[in-house]
Image (tube, helix red, strand yellow):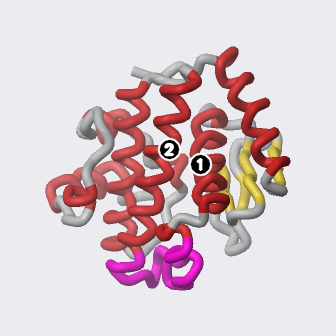
Amino acid sequence: MRKTVNKKNFAKFFEWSKKYLKENKKELRITKYRTMRLSNGDKCQGWCDGNTLAVASGGRKFEETYCHEFSHITQSVEDIQLWQDYLADPDCRSSITASWDSIMSVAMLERDCEIRSLNFSNKWGLFNSEVYAQETNLYLFYHQYLFLRKKWINTSTIYRRPLIKLMPKKIITVKTLSKIDMNLMLEFDKHLKND
């Protein structure tokens, strides 16, 4: 079940978010391509460094990615502890060499971000909440997989239907995220090992 985006509601959210960005002196960059490159060369659909929100608009997940990266901006503006921890730990930004604690720090930051995104979605009527939660959970468990594989996998390739179907329809708890589910990791490996 593909989550459909309410384009009319997203347009309203987008306009509101641009005002928020301007009020907080944040930059918005949108490209027409399906992906963009990070400074290390890795491909992604969007990124946020706390001052700039950048999203590739050519992919099928533009609206979801925009909402996600915008939620990171709100973490930065509010200067939450998870954001401070992320900025303070250079290991957090390397999926290849990161320690378990650093990976979990990133995963917790992402979990908070996804909860914010889901709250925006519910408030503005943007996406199907259950499907969004399933894809969120896939993304959160993906951090465990990164830790085990020590290899970056483009996030746009992880959203495979067989993996999404295995995910809970509510965002997983911190406790669940903190423990590696090896059976689930074997499923990840089955579907992603050649990526």
Residue at the spot of label 1: 71
- Which is more toward the observer, 133 or 182? 133
Alpha-carbon distance for marks 2 and 1?
6 Å
Q: Which residue is mark 2?
A: 116
Vertical comparison of 113 with 130: above or below: below
Q: Are marks 2 and 1 in contact (CB under 8 Å)?
A: yes
Rendered image quadrant of residue 59: top right
User: What residue do we see at 29% from left, 36% from top?
Assistant: 170
Q: Earlier in the sequence, mark 2 or mark 1?
A: 1
* Horizontal and vertical percent position of residue 162: 30, 36
Q: Give the magenta range.
A: 84-102
Q: Nearer the viewer, residue 23 or 37?
A: 23
Q: Quadrant of residue 39?
A: bottom right
Question: What residue lies at 33% left-to-right and 49% top-to-bottom?
Answer: 191
Q: Secondary structure at mark 1?
A: helix
Mark 2, other Cα within 10 Å: few <14 / some 14–19 / many ≥20 = some
Identify residue type, mark 1. Answer: Ser
